[in-house]
Amino acid sequence: MEKTIFEITKMDCPSEENLIRMKLDEVSNIKNLDFDIPNRKLTVFHSGGIAIIEKSIEELNLGGKKLKTEQSDQTEFKKQSNQKKLLWTVLAINFVFFLIEMTTGLISKSMGLVADSLDMLADSFVYGISLFAVGGTLIRKKRIAKIAGIFQIILAILGFMEVLRRFFFESDNLPNFSTMIIVALFALVANGICLYILQKSKSKEEAHMKASMIFTSNDVIINLGVIAAGLLVNWLNSNKPDLIIGMIVFILVTQGALRILKLGN
């Protein structure tokens, strides 16, 4: 058996781990996948060639790069405990906060919260595909991924168009900055809980939420961005900070949707 170590520069949260797992499900010569999210490393234990594995990782556009391949004597691998239950838990948390942020974003007129809600929905899609595709055929998994990716792109485009409309025609329409900050703070806590829940199924060392893991997560950075935008809205008395963070997040959501579509190819 061989093991190949990859550096995945854009892998900074468990949803991207699940994307990679789903993408590599179809590769029959893989024996085990060992993810090191804090250090952005993936170790693939496999028999036979590495070319198809390397190609599959590159197709996700997560900055995957092969570092080295070496022989391995390891034949037994630790199974993650209650993985299906954990995925259902984080799916529920992400989907509930999608509803909360979408609702409060529309009420408070904050595009930052609306965009952040779509980021939560994107994570829900990833965990949902992981669950609903289990035991199903490859065609079923690809169909679900394609529908989810297209739906997400449509929502992101609509959101982006709304940002442009407000930027040019409603410059005096200020969002409620206090709602932005409070809801984003709760979303930040929710993301931290999701990280902890998913990591506790792994080794004891990884179960502790290392700072390097928490603060490199895109989800957490987005939450902090919405909080900062809320403060700037109040300070500058302008809706531009909210629109700017909304625009950035809609772009990130679109990139995530394209990665989900890669699963459908």
Image (cartoon, rainbow, N blue to C red):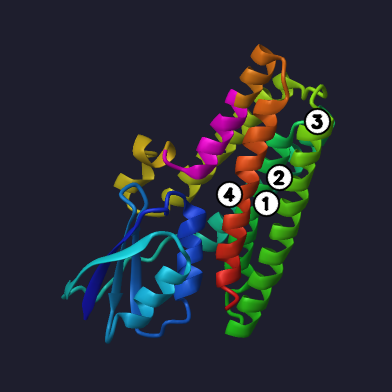
For disc 1, the marked residue is 121
Q: Majority secondary structure of the magenta segment?
A: helix
Q: Is residue 199 above or below residue 111?
A: below
For disc 2, the marked residue is 98
Q: Nearer the viewer, mark 3 or mark 1?
A: 3
Q: Are marks 2 and 3 in contact (CB under 8 Å)?
A: no
Residue 210 image offset from top left, x and y in percent: 35, 38
Q: Is residue 76 above or below residue 128?
A: below
Is 191 left, or right, of 115 in this rendering? left
Q: Is residue 58 visible?
A: yes
Residue 246 image offset from top left, x and y in percent: 67, 38
Residue 118 image offset from top left, x and y in percent: 68, 48
Instruction: Give the residue type that dot 1 points to.
Output: Leu
* Element class at badge 2: helix
Instruction: Give the residue type that dot 2 points to.
Output: Phe
Dot 4 or dot 3, earlier in sequence:
3
Is 239 left, or right, of 130 in this rendering? right
Gap in angstroms between the C-alphas marked 4 and 3:
20 Å
Q: Nearer the viewer, mark 2 or mark 4?
A: 4
Say whether residue 224 is magenta: yes
Q: Which residues lie in the magenta part?
A: 216-228
Gap in angstroms between the C-alphas marked 1 and 4:
13 Å
* Element class at badge 1: helix
Instruction: Give the residue type that dot 3 points to.
Output: Lys
Say whether residue 183 is magenta: no
At x 62% / y 25%, what residue is drawn? 229
